Image: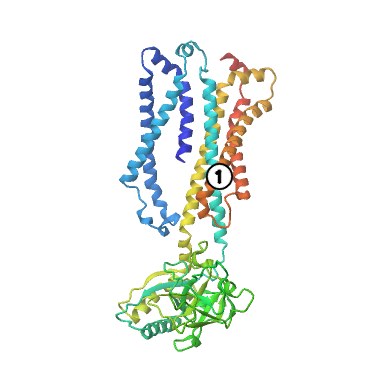
């Protein structure tokens, strides 16, 4: 964006320099050195960019009020996003560098100018006119190229975000309330105490009017706590070069899967048979089942966790086997697009056999889940008045917060892309408008000799579209560099997605056509008598 803006201003400065050329060379003729002229031009542009930086900072302060609309509070360290002294000084420093660079552009334009030739010339042309026109066209090509790259980035992020929204999380997030607690070891000293609290809390929650289901887990989807651990299947033989896998390890209570709307593929969910005194059981997802039993039914099969640090795959007298009693559809745990441990799957322990101190309640409601937030807090506090209840959020809010980074990046890129598109349109329009003004007499002669309005319109329009096409060609090369920076942020779409490339190309071409059509139409209205009389 900074480069596009600077290129646009540089283009305007070339026009202004051409208009002031006689004034500047007159100063040189009267004894001013080119160094003095350069200092004047640099000072003027420093003042311009410094004022612009101050205005930009003011706009930045106002823009930060839109953080809520971008859901930036869900971003890591979002509270640190602010305009402070460091930001202000950085902006002013960048403005100074840009101001000096822009001031040197007209100064360099004066280097090849013959003072006597300019002073004896009549009309609008100048000794360096042809070179200046080429530079201005080149700057427009650069603008269009930068805009193309920015719009491709915005388009890819938008397409990626749409793919993320279409992802099936493996459960139903609607009307589910979550709340987390941490049971201190000084009051809950053993597994029996932990299970007693969890069981009583679930019993009371399920009795609340408006609650249709409740369960407990130690890993809330799209939360902040994840655990993974190596697990193996009985009798499984590892292939040469194959590594051990460490899937997501999750503890859930009976009723949890039903509460969040998980899909049972085969077998059963946890129930009273999976209590502390029952047989050791396990539920796995489809991905893990396919990993160990690709062509078999995993129900009834046994798995185990390493019991010997010297040989992780060894079965010893301390090995504890867990029987698979159910298979569930793959669920997104880390995020809709962030696979994390989901690359190798997940397995679930019954909570009474593996009680946890940090637990989260999942509560399905008949209506708005947040309407029961106060009731849930009061109910848990009724069990333990000293127990804080935190992260009381709906599952839908958790899902939205997990998308905050992608949504914010997409919106920011889209905003930059729109501004870049407008600046590019201004650049194309400005070059062609100046071209028409410079060639007024030539166009008047063409019309006087019989050239039609359509021919004149095509003449100007063709130049604008050629500039746009050149910019698109240069920008296409920049898309390759964009791929590396966007790969980690894209989901379900490649950096060379043909639909995005085609859409952005058509959009830029349409905008360039409109920007070129305005001065082209103006050219058709030139009166040859007036033009020839100038």
Tell me where residue 267 sits by quadrant: bottom right
Task: Name the one closer to the observer, 424 or 312.
Answer: 312
Tell me where residue 468 sits by quadrant: top right
- Percent of width and height locating residue 88: 33, 43
- Judging from the image, the colouring scheme is rainbow
Q: Is residue 444 left or right of residue 336?
A: right
- Whether residue 236 can be seen here: yes
**Can you say whether 520 is above or below 188 in the image?**
above
- Percent of width and height locating residue 348: 49, 77
Tell me where residue 87 sits by quadrant: top left
Task: Name the one closer to the observer, 319 or 38.
Answer: 319
**Can you say whether 443 is above or below 170 in the image?**
above
Q: Is residue 94 left or right of residue 284?
A: left
Task: Name the one closer to the observer, 265 or 372.
Answer: 265
Crowd band around label 1 with a 10 angstrom C-alpha radius: few (<14), some (14–19), many (20+)? many
Mark 1 secondary-structure assignment: helix
For the view shown, which residue lies furthest in the bottom direction? 277
- Percent of width and height locating residue 220: 45, 71
Give the tally of numbered discs. 1
Question: Where is mark 1, residue-wise?
Answer: 479
Task: Name the one closer to the observer, 459 or 34.
Answer: 34
- Percent of width and height locating residue 451: 69, 22
Residue at coordinates 57% horizontally, 25% vertically from top-left? 436
For the C terminus, give its image quadrant.
top right
- Whether residue 213 can be seen here: no
Q: Is residue 389 left or right of residue 290?
A: left
């Amino acid at each position: 964006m900074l480069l596009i803006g600077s290129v646009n201003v540089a283009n305007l400065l070339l026009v202004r320099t051409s208009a002031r050329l006689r004034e500047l060379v007159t100063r040189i003729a009267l004894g001013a050195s080119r160094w003095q002229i350069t200092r004047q031009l640099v000072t003027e542009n420093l003042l311009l960019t410094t004022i612009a930086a101050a205005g930009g900072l003011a706009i930045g302060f106002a823009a930060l009020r839109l953080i809520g609309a971008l859901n930036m509070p869900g971003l890591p360290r979002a509270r640190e996003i602010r305009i402070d002294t460091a930001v202000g000084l950085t902006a002013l420093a960048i403005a100074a560098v840009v101001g000096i660079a822009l001031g040197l552009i007209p100064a360099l334009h004066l280097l090849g100018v013959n003072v006597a030739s300019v002073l004896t010339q009549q009309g609008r042309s100048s000794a360096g006119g042809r070179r200046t026109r080429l530079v201005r066209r080149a700057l427009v090509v650069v603008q269009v190229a930068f805009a193309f790259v920015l719009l491709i980035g915005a388009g890819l992020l938008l397409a990626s975000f749409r793919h993320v929204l279409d992802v099936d999380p493996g459960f139903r997030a609607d009307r589910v309330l979550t709340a987390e607690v941490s049971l201190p070891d000084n009051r809950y000293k053993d597994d029996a105490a932990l299970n007693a609290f969890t069981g009583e809390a679930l019993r009371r929650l399920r009795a609340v009017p408006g609650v249709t289901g409740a369960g407990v887990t130690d890993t809330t989807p799209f939360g902040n706590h994840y655990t993974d651990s190596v697990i193996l299947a009985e009798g499984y033989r590892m292939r040469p070069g194959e590594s051990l896998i460490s899937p997501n390890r999750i503890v859930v209570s009976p009723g949890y899967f039903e509460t969040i709307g998980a899909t049972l593929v085969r077998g059963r969910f946890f129930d009273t048979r999976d209590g502390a005194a029952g047989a050791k059981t396990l539920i796995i997802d489809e991905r893990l089942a396919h990993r160990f039993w690709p062509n078999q039914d995993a129900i009834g099969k046994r798995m185990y966790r390493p019991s010997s640090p010297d040989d992780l795959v060894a079965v010893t007298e301390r090995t504890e086997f867990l029987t698979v009693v159910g298979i569930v559809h793959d669920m997104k745990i880390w995020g809709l697009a962030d696979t994390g441990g989901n690359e190798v799957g997940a397995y679930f322990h019954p909570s009474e056999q593996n009680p946890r101190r940090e637990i989260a309640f999942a509560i399905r409601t008949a209506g708005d889940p947040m309407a029961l937030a106060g009731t849930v807090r009061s109910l848990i506090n009724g069990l333990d008045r000293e127990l804080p209840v935190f992260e009381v959020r709906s599952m839908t809010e958790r899902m939205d917060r997990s998308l905050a980074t992608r949504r914010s990046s997409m919106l920011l890129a889209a905003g930059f892309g729109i501004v870049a598109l407008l600046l590019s349109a201004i650049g194309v329009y400005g070059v062609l408008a100046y071209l028409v003004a410079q060639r007024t007499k030539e166009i008047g002669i063409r019309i006087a000799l019989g050239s039609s309005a359509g021919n004149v319109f095509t003449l100007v329009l063709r130049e604008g579209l050629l500039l746009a096409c050149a910019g698109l060609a240069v920008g296409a090369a920049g898309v390759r560099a964009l791929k590396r920076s966007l790969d980690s942020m894209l989901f379900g779409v490649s950096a060379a997605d043909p639909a995005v490339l085609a859409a952005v190309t058509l959009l830029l071409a349409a905008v360039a056509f409109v920007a070129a059509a305005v001065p082209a139409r103006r050219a058709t209205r030139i009166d040859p008598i007036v033009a020839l009389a100038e």
